[in-house]
Image (cartoon, rainbow, N blue to C red):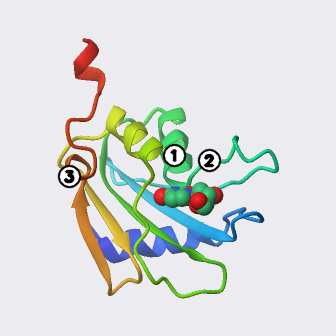
């Protein structure tokens, strides 16, 4: 896996974030099993509730294209015009959405830059997560 390439793709996706309310722009790059990269950004809404996070945008783009197996995801987020102070970790809804399709050991690359990032697995972020296996 080319970690730097995935982080770069997440930064590129962040450029397309639509965040006129929070001014917090997020980009995600999801690496599929076959090597394809699906990117996503957050897309906010004047009614607030329909807002979607970058991670789910990327995931739903992939799944809607017939791709369901993934190797990794890179996530970057920061306020408009600010350098990343903290890593952006996916919200609870996105953790649950990823849990539907990704293995517990899938790495999430939470990046401040191409040089500064931390890697955590989905299982660490969502211990005892409820998933497809529970209802099979
Ligand atoms: N957001 C994401 O896109 N991903 C995250 O991991 C955290 C939050 C978005 C939602 C909203 O548009 C903005 O960031 C502020 O919460």
Residue displayed at 54% across by 33% down: 64
User: Mark 2 and 1 residues: CB-CB less than 8 Å, in contact?
Assistant: yes
Residue displayed at 53% across by 88% down: 83
Report x, y in % for residue 8. 46, 76
Report x, y in % for residue 61. 55, 43
- In the displayed structure image, the side of residue 92 where residue 56 appears, left or right: right
Cα–Cα gap, marks 2 and 1 = 7 Å
State the SS at label 2: loop
Q: Which mark is residue 56?
A: 1
- In the displayed structure image, the side of residue 47 where residue 38 appears, left or right: left
Label 3 environment density (alpha carbons within 10 Å; few <14, some 14–19, many ≥20): few
Q: Which mark is residue 52?
A: 2
Label 2 environment density (alpha carbons within 10 Å; few <14, some 14–19, many ≥20): some
User: Mark 2 and 3 residues: CB-CB less than 8 Å, in contact?
Assistant: no
User: Residue tagged by mark 3?
Assistant: 124
Between 46 and 56, the one lying in front of the other is 46
Report x, y in % for residue 51. 67, 47
State the SS at label 3: helix
- In the displayed structure image, the side of residue 18 where residue 86 appears, left or right: left
Q: Vertically, is 7 above or below 58?
A: below
Report x, y in % for residue 21. 75, 63
Cα–Cα gap, marks 1 and 3 = 19 Å
């Amino acid at each position: 896996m080319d970690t730097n390439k995935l982080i770069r793709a997440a930064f590129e996706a962040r450029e397309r974030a639509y965040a006129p309310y929070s001014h917090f722009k997020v980009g995600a790059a999801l690496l599929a099993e076959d090597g394809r990269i699906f990117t996503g950004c957050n897309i906010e809404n004047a009614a607030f509730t329909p807002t979607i996070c970058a991670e789910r945008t990327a995931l739903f783009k992939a799944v809607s294209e017939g791709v369901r197996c993934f190797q990794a995801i890179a996530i970057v987020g920061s306020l408009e015009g600010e350098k990343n102070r903290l890593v952006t970790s996916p919200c609870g809804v996105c953790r649950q959405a990823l849990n539907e399709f990704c293995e517990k050991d899938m790495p999430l690359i939470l990046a401040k830059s191409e040089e500064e990032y931390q890697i955590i697995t989905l299982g660490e972020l969502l211990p005892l997560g409820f998933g497809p296996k529970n209802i099979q």
